[in-house]
Image: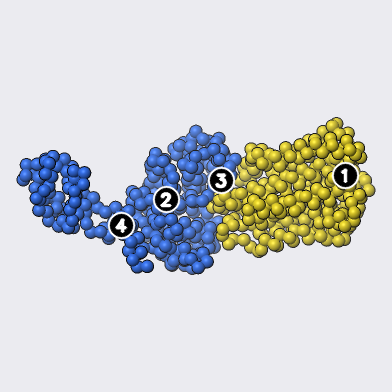
Amino acid sequence: MKAFTIHFSFEFLAGLRNRTLLMMNYLFPLGFYVFAGAMMTGINPDFRGEIIPAMLTFAILSATILGLPGPLVETREGGILRSYRINGVPAASIMTIPAFSTAIHLVLVGAVITVTAPFVFKAPLPQNWPAYMLIYLLMVFACSGLGSLIGVISGNSRQTILWSQLIYLPSMLLSGMMVPADLLPGPFVKMGHLLPAAYVMQSFQSLAYGREALYEPLPGMLILLAGGVIAFGLALYLFSWDSHNNTRRGHPSMAALALLPYILGALLLV
Amino acid sequence: MHDPAVEVTDLSKHYGSVAAVDRISFTVQRGEIFGLLGPNGAGKTTTLECLEGLRRPDGGVIRVMGVDPGRDSRRLLQLIGVQLQTGSLPDYISVVEAVRLFSAYHGVTPDYAILNRIGLGEKLQAQYHTLSTGQKRRLALVLALAHRPPVVLLDEPTAGLDVATRVALHSLIRELRDAGATILLSTHDMAEAESMADRVAIMLRGRLVAVGSPRQLTSAGSRLTKISVRTAGKGGMAGATLPGVERRDRQDDYDLYFTVTPGPTVTAVIAHIEGSGDELIDLRVERPSLEERFLELTAEEAVKR
C-alpha cells in the first residue's frame, strides 16, 4: 500500500510536470470549455443546457483517450518498464496508477467546469448530484480502460494516435456532445453508441438532469461499467513489458473485444 | 562449502536463426566479482537478461542463489540488484522520488546516504531528464542496491562515463564485494575487467571461449614477457647477450626484450649494465594484458571459422 501511495503521488505530480499531460488533463479541456462554451451558447442558447455534460465528457475523452496511451507506449519503448519490472513494480500498478491519477485530475477539471459554468454561461446545474458524480466516474473508468488498452496494443506513437483518433473523433461528432442525439440521423445515433460517450450523454440527460432520453439510464450505465471492466481486463491480459521480447499473451486484435458491450448496446438500446 | 551464487549450465538463446547465446556454462562463487567480457553482440546482455528473468532461455539451466529465474521471479527480485544497459526512468521523476519509489516496492527503508557517496547528493530534487549520462548511471546503480541484494548484475556500468566517475563506481563495486555481495559485471572494457574482476569469462559470438582469473587467462596466452630497459649510456644495451630472449626491439630510448625466462633475463640485464659501467634509468617487466589475450582469442576464433 505504501508503494502504491508513493507511486500514485509521483504519477499525479507527473501529470502536472509533464507538459503533454498538463495539456491533455487541464489546458486543452478547460481551453475548449471556454472557447466552445462562448461560441456554442452564442450560436444556440439551448446549448447552455448541454454545456456541463458535454464539456465533462470532452475533458474525459481528452485526458484518457488522448492522454493516457502515449506515456504508456513511451515507458515501454524507452526501457522504463524494464526498470520497473526488475525492481518489482507489478503490471497492475503500471496499468491502474496512471488511470487513477488521471481520474483525480479529471475530478478537479470537472469541479472547475461544474462550478464556473452556471456563472460564466448561465448553464443549469444537475438535479441529481449523486447520479451526476456516478456517471462521471463511470465514464472516467470506461475511457481509462480504453486509453490503457490503446497504450498496451500500440507498437509506437503513430499507432497510438491512429487508435486514439478512431475513438475520439466519432465520440465528439456522434455522441450528442456537439449535436443533440435527437437531431442526428438514426444510423449515426447507432454508430455513436459503439463508443462510451453516447451512453454518458444519455445518462446525464435522464438521470442527472431529469430530461427525456433515448432509453432508460440503468442499461447505459451497466454498459459503461462492463466496458471499463473488459477494457482493463484486456489491457492487463495483453500487457507486455518489452515489445522486443515475446512476453505478450494473446494477439493485440483481442482488444476489439472491449467494444462488445457498446456493440450490444447499439443493437439493443437504440 | 556454499553453493555458487550463480550457476549457468548449457544456456542457449536464439533470436530467429541467430544463436545469441550458444550452450554456455559457468559458475559465479559467492562474494566474487565475475566479469563477463566480449565485444558488442557477443551475447553478454542476453545472458544477463536470462539471469534476470527478463528473457526466457531456449535451453539450459540457470540458478541464482538456488532460484530458477523463469519460475520464481518474485523471490529472484529479492535476491538480485540489476543495473540494466537499456533501462531508464520516467523523465519527470526526481532522484529522491526514484529512490523512495523503488525502495517502497522492495519493502525497505530508503538509504539516501549512498546518494551523497556517489555524488548525487546535490541532485536529490533534480528530475531524471535533467541528469547527465553519468548521473543516470550512478542513479541506476543506487536503485539496483536499494534493497541490499546478495547478487548484483551490472551491464556495462561505466560505459560512457568520465574517469572520475568510473573510479568512484569501481570503488563502490569493490566495497560491495568486500561486504559480501556477489557481482556479475558485463563489460567490453578489458582494463576494467582486469582491474576489477576476480574471474572473467570471455564471450565471442554467443560462446564462452575462456574462463578464469585475469592472471590465468593472460598466462595461458602468449608465453613472452616484455622487459623494457632504459640506461643513461647512449649505446643502451647494445651487445648484451640475454638468456631466454626470443625477440628484441628498440622504442623511445627503451630496449625491449620479449623473453620466456623473465627472471634470468632481468638478472642478466642488470649484470650487463654494471659490467659496462652504465647507469640504469628505468626497468619494466610486463606480462601480456587481458586485452592482448582477448585479441589473441578473437584471432584464434576467426581462424577456426
Going by the numbered disc 3, the residue's amino acid type is Leu
Under circle 2, the secondary element is: loop
Query: Label 3: chain?
Result: B
In the picture, one chain is blue; tell me its letter: B
Q: Nearer the viewer, mark 4 or mark 1?
A: 4
Under circle 4, the secondary element is: helix
Under circle 1, the secondary element is: helix
Give the image location of residue A241, x and y in percent: 59, 55
What's the colour scheme? by chain
Discs 2 and 1 carry the same chain letter: no
Residue B271 visible in this rendered orientation of the protein = no
Determine whether, in the image, residue B61 is placed left or right of residue B213. right
Say which residue appears at 6% left-offset and 44% top-offset: B276
In three-dimensional space, the C-alpha distance between marks 3 and 4, rounded to whole angstroms, equals: 38 Å
Q: Quadrant of the N terminus of chain B?
A: bottom left
Determine whether, in the image, residue A36 is placed left or right of residue B89. right
Tell me whether circle 3 and circle 4 mark residues in contact (CB < 8 Å).
no
Which residue is denoted by mark 3 in the rendering? Answer: B89
How many labels sit on residues? 4
Query: Label 4: chain?
Result: B
In three-dimensional space, the C-alpha distance between marks 1 and 3, rounded to whole angstroms, equals: 43 Å
Discs 3 and 2 carry the same chain letter: yes
In three-dimensional space, the C-alpha distance between marks 3 and 2, rounded to whole angstroms, equals: 25 Å
Query: Label 2: chain?
Result: B
Query: Closer to the N terminus: mark 3 or mark 4?
Result: 3
Say which residue appears at 86% left-offset and 39% top-offset: A40
Which residue is denoted by mark 2 in the rendering? Answer: B181
Q: Determine the colour of chain A.
A: yellow
Give the image location of residue A67, x and y in percent: 69, 46
Which residue is denoted by mark 1 in the rendering? Answer: A208
